[in-house]
Image (cartoon, grey):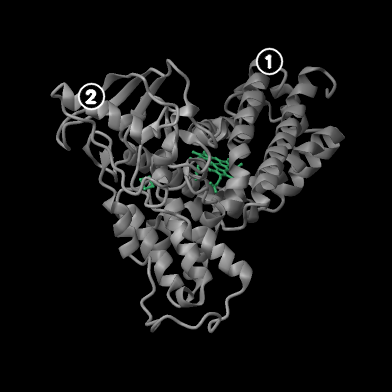
């Protein structure tokens, strides 16, 4: 298949950036979106041009490194799919495709489609951990955790930290990301100890890093390649209220 | 202070003030519906309210406080949110965000304008100086609220304005009601779709209730 790509090109943080058009020819429907871009880049290199910079690592949907907004939807909008797992068969021959970087003040563009997502690490540093000593690997079931709690925490822990929730959010809020961490830890006995302190400092960091405020559009859940539910945001809000009265 | 500084704290203030304003909107409609009982209904209702004396003023101050807090944080959250999103996408597609969720600040500010007009119209009565000057009293010497309302809505312009304002309120609450529950942490994946639907239903019932008054008056069904 042949495609027309409209790609955001930006020569470093200082550059203004612009959309540029490329033709992707003879694309195999079985290739992944990133493989399609690899081939476009090979062609650009052959022509002596600068290849399109984009982030990727595992290419199997678990590391959270790939990050592209395709036709206005983070990761291309296929249900629970990262860009690296998106295949060209979900496009049609002759399609015009828009490829843009995550857009948020907190995620400055480094080059082309690659953005700096360190702001998410700053939120983690503000409390996304437990500081109690948990010792060596405990015997299974030494610490009893109910199945529903374990499942709930596991669902929250599915977050791969890619930042698609921020990219999809109309307010560039990192609330879904933060809530997944807060909810996961607040559900487990090791995390409960510091729950109040954690929710206050992580949400304070959210603002300090320049992320917007959540206004419940729920676009984040639709954008998340892991389908993290906005019920975790309600959990974060509940944890915050508990912390207030503590 | 934690509440006014924190992103979630300020959202909570929005939600709590929004919920109390919603409570007022519901009670206000119940009170207004006494217009359907004729002059005696609404005039005695109004008289009873006014006889509460200082409590009326306490109530008015609380309402003013709620609106000021709600607007203050509504505007500042919106400004911060647009500062956090300096560049939009060349191609943009929404999947969960709705027309009403995206227009909260506009419907909110339109409501503010309407609230001011509404107070001038019926409370201070300066939009109808002639009527205010007449100091109309009803048969047993109570202020004739019934006459004021019925005369007020005889003008098509006024009726249209009220109907439009109530549609704006409907849009604001279509997003607002479920948003309250999510923000105060009282929703989950099972309840959210139900609450969203129920919230829209409540907003629609309020719309029908409020517009029924001017429409029945202009249709001549409720008359002096
Ligand atoms: C007076 C002018 C008003 C302005 C400027 C305004 C503005 C706003 C804004 C910007 C939001 C969005 C906040 C967010 O999405 O988190 C909001 C939410 C809300 N507003 Fe208003 N509003 C006004 C009046 C009202 C009135 C009269 C009511 C009551 C009927 C009301 C009820 C609500 C509710 C229930 C919410 C949802 C709270 C939440 O997000 O949890 N607002 N308002
Ligand atoms: S490259 Fe690892 S998730 Fe896509």
**Above or below, comparing residue A246 to residue A70 in the picture:** below
Q: Picture quarter containing residue A150?
A: bottom right
- Of discs 2 and 1, which sits in the foreground? 2
Mark 2, chain letter?
A: A
Q: Is A37 placed left or right of B65 in the picture?
A: left
Q: Nearer the viewer, residue B140 or B170?
A: B170
Image x and y of residue B190, in percent:
67, 52
Q: Looking at the figure, which quarter contains the N terminus of chain A? A: top left
Alpha carbon of mark 2 to alpha carbon of mark 1: how far?
Answer: 68 Å
Crowding near the residue tagged with mark 2, few <14, some 14–19, many ≥20 C-alpha atoms within 10 Å: some
Q: Is A116 placed left or right of B139 in the picture?
A: left
Q: Is mark 1 within 8 Å of ligand 1?
A: no
Q: Find disc 1 in the rendering and name its residue.
A: B156
Q: Find disc 2 in the rendering and name its residue.
A: A43
Q: Picture quarter containing residue A170?
A: top left
**Above or below, comparing residue B147 to residue A237 in the picture:** above
Q: Is residue B144 visible?
A: no
Q: Is B191 placed left or right of A225 in the picture?
A: right
**Above or below, comparing residue B150 to residue B179 in the picture:** above
| Dot 1: element | helix
Q: Is mark 2 within 8 Å of ligand 2?
A: no
Q: Residue at x 45, y 56 (%)?
A: B8
Mark 1, chain letter?
A: B
Q: Nearer the viewer, residue B108 or A126?
A: A126
Crowding near the residue tagged with mark 1, few <14, some 14–19, many ≥20 C-alpha atoms within 10 Å: few
Same chain, marks 2 and 1? no
Q: Residue at x 62, y 22 (%)?
A: B161
Q: Nearer the viewer, residue A198 or B92?
A: B92
Image x and y of residue A212, in percent:
38, 46
Tag 2–tag 1 contact (CB < 8 Å): no
Q: Residue at x 71, y 34 (%)?
A: B204
């Amino acid at each position: 298949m042949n495609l027309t790509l409209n790609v955001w090109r930006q020569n470093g943080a200082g550059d203004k950036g612009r959309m540029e058009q490329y033709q992707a020819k003879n694309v195999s429907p079985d290739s992944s979106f990133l493989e399609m871009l690899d081939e476009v880049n090979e062609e650009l290199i052959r022509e002596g041009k600068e290849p399109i910079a984009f982030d990727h690592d595992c290419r199997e949907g678990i590391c959270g490194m790939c990050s592209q907004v395709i036709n206005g939807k983070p990761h291309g909008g296929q249900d629970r799919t990262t860009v690296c797992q998106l295949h060209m068969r979900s496009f049609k021959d002759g399609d015009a495709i828009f490829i843009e970087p995550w857009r948020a003040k907190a995620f400055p563009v480094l080059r082309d489609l690659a953005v700096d997502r360190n702001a998410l690490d700053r939120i983690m540093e503000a409390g996304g951990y437990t500081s109690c000593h948990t010792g060596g690997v405990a015997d299974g079931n030494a610490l009893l955790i109910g199945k529903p709690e374990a499942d709930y925490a596991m669902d929250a822990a599915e977050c791969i930290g890619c930042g698609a929730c921020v990219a999809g959010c109309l307010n560039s809020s990192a609330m879904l990301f933060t809530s997944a961490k807060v909810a996961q830890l607040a559900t487990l006995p090791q995390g409960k100890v510091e729950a109040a302190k954690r929710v206050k400092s992580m949400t304070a960091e959210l603002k300090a890093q320049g992320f917007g405020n959540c206004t419940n559009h729920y676009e984040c859940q639709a954008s998340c390649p892991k389908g993290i539910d906005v019920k975790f945001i309600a959990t974060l809000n509940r944890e915050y209220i508990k912390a207030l009265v503590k | 202070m934690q509440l006014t500084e924190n992103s979630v704290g300020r959202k909570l203030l929005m939600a709590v003030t929004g919920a109390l304003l919603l409570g007022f909107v519901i009670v206000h409609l119940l009170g207004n519906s006494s217009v359907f009982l004729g002059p005696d209904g609404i005039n005695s209702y109004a008289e009873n309210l006014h006889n509460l004396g200082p409590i009326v003023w306490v109530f008015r101050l609380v309402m003013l406080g709620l609106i000021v807090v709600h607007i203050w944080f509504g505007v500042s959250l919106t400004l911060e949110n647009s500062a956090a999103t300096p560049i939009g996408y060349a191609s943009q597609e929404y999947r969960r965000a709705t027309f009403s969720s995206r227009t909260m600040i506009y419907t909110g500010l339109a409501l503010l304008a309407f609230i001011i007009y509404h107070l001038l119209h019926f409370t201070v009565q300066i939009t109808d100086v002639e009527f205010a000057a007449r100091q109309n009293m009803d048969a047993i010497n109570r202020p004739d609220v019934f006459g004021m309302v019925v005369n007020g809505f005889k003008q098509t312009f006024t009726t249209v304005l009220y109907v439009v304002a109530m549609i704006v309120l409907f849009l604001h609450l279509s997003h607002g009601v479920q948003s309250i529950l999510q923000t105060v942490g009282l929703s989950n994946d099972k309840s959210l779709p139900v609450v969203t639907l129920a919230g829209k239903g409540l907003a629609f019932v309020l719309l029908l209730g409020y517009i029924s008054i001017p429409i029945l008056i202009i249709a001549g069904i409720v008359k002096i």
